[in-house]
Amino acid sequence: MTQVLTPDAQGLTTAAELLRGGGLVAFPTETVYGLGGDARSDQAVARIFEAKGRPRFNPLIVHVPDLETARLFADFDDRAERVASAFWPGPLTLVLPLKAEAGLSPLVTAGLDSVAIRVPAHPVARALLAAFGGPVAAPSANPSGKVSPTRARHVIDGLSGRIAAVVDGGACAVGVESTILGLIDGAKLLRPGGVPAEVLEACLGHSLSSGGDAERPNAPGQLLSHYAPSSAVRLNQTAPLSGDFWLGFGPEAARSDLNLSASGDLIEAAANLFHYLRQADDAAGGRPIAVSPIPETGLGRAINDRLRRAAAPRQ
Ligand code: TXA
Ligand code: MG
């Protein structure tokens, strides 16, 4: 049985004890719910892969409470220090050289000599990291390849019985996963996410190269089909066919079945994205889901990235 814990002192103490015992606890972050396990324990990390049905070549993100702790696990050069100071805590993951002596399970990094690390901003995630007192490996808390969870209910729907507990902290404010910035050779955008690429570029003072290669994923969300609802998904539909379920965006989609943001606000659309994809999938009952065009700027890049994967041919 998967326990649903409240995010108070008692719930967090229980969650931290479960983590210490090598168990899996899902918890809210500002982006999506993560499926947490002790990042130093081979057994706990192996359980994460098993619970999600995730390929083991796909490494995990390590969550820590602050930059000082992050420096124990990764080498920070000047650029890494600058972006970490600017955006942590927050929806940014850095891929940096691993400090091999720091004691992370090699399963976390899939044997790479780099590590993905982030400091989440959500108060419940921060309280859990403090109560546990160690690094927490956490992919999104959904079965591999499915839509990411932004509510405790979504976690239960996908993973009930496969994990020890979920801490219910309500809806996630950002709604799409963290931006992944690789700072090993050059500065590469490995995954668009909660911090818009333009904002990172302004901080670094130069543009980012794109690091994605769907054939050889080095950032996991890069497997082409991902976030897949059971209905077919058609993108950039301004006038959907009758019979389609219309997932709209903006005032032009006033007649849509569900609107990601009636006012055309990308922040609101990101926060609604995964929840509405699930609702659309339930309501569509097998009909295709037609999605309005989303502008490719700011959080729109992360939204379009997720939608393209939701629409990709299934593996
Ligand atoms: O917002 C988020 O990032 C959420 C919350 C829970 O923190 N987590 C998340 O984890 O999205 P996950 O496992 O769904 O995505 C982690 C991504 C994967 O695409 C993986 O390939 C990439 O991070 N990654 C991890 N370690 C890496 C490394 N050393 N080099 C390149 N990519 C890495
Ligand atoms: Mg994921």
Image: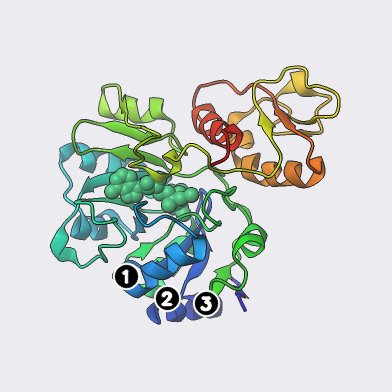
Name the residue beneath numbered marker 2.
19
Q: Disc 3 marks which amino acid? A: Ala
Residue 73 coordinates in the image, percent (x, y): 21, 58
Residue 97 coordinates in the image, percent (x, y): 18, 48
**Residue 2 sits in which quadrant?**
bottom right
**Residue 251 sits in which quadrant?**
top right
Name the residue beneath numbered marker 3.
9
297 relative position to 71: left or right: right
Q: Nearer the viewer, mark 1 or mark 3?
A: 1
For marks 2 and 3 on the same chain, the one whose residue lies earlier in the sequence: 3
Residue 300 coordinates in the image, percent (x, y): 54, 27
Q: Disc 1 marks which amino acid? A: Gly
Mark number for residue 134? 1
For marks 1 and 2 on the same chain, the one whose residue lies earlier in the sequence: 2
Is residue 269 among what the camera can see? yes
Q: Disc 2 marks which amino acid? A: Leu
